[in-house]
Image (tube, rainbow, N blue to C red):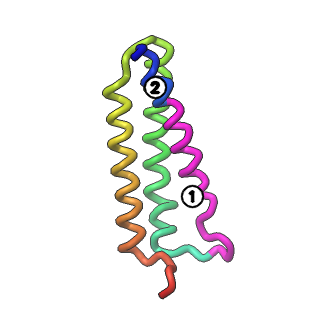
Amino acid sequence: MPKRWYGILGSISVAIGAILSYYDYTMIGFPDGHLTEFDRFFKSFLFPVYIGLNVLFGVLFLNALFLKKKSRLTFFLYLILSTIFLAATYYFSITLENGQGG
């Protein structure tokens, strides 16, 4: 693979992850504005942490892209941290009160 391949792929995945996370953030409290425990936790902790990681990895991927460095380790680290974030989101969505009726 070319040296820039992981930088390009990483930059695209960071952008997609940030857009999808921001979409979830904008839907908090929709349609009545009521915030559940999970919504408050997502808004105050999970979202800022994930966006911070996206900014950090976005800078690393763009740096690797412009300096023509291999960024395979950075890409796999980003995938692992994104998977951990998704697992944490799932865990807290089933353990915290999330307004799901029964």
Q: Amino acid at mark 1?
A: Asp
Q: Is residue 15 magenta?
A: yes
Question: Dominant secondary structure of the magenta stretch?
Answer: helix
Q: Which of marks 1 and 2 precedes in the sequence?
A: 1
Q: Is 23 rendered above or below residue 99?
A: above
Q: Which mark is residue 24?
A: 1
Q: Is residue 30 above or below residue 85?
A: below
Residue linked to disc 2: 61
Taking the view exactly as shown, the residue that stands out farthest to the front is: 1
Quadrant of the frame with the N terminus: top left
Residue 74, label in figure = none
The type of residue carrying mark 2 is Phe
Question: On screen, 82 above or below 70?
Answer: below
At 49% from the left edge and 45% from the top edge, which residue is drawn? Answer: 51
Residue stretch rendered in magenta on the structure: 11-33
Secondary element type, mark 1: helix
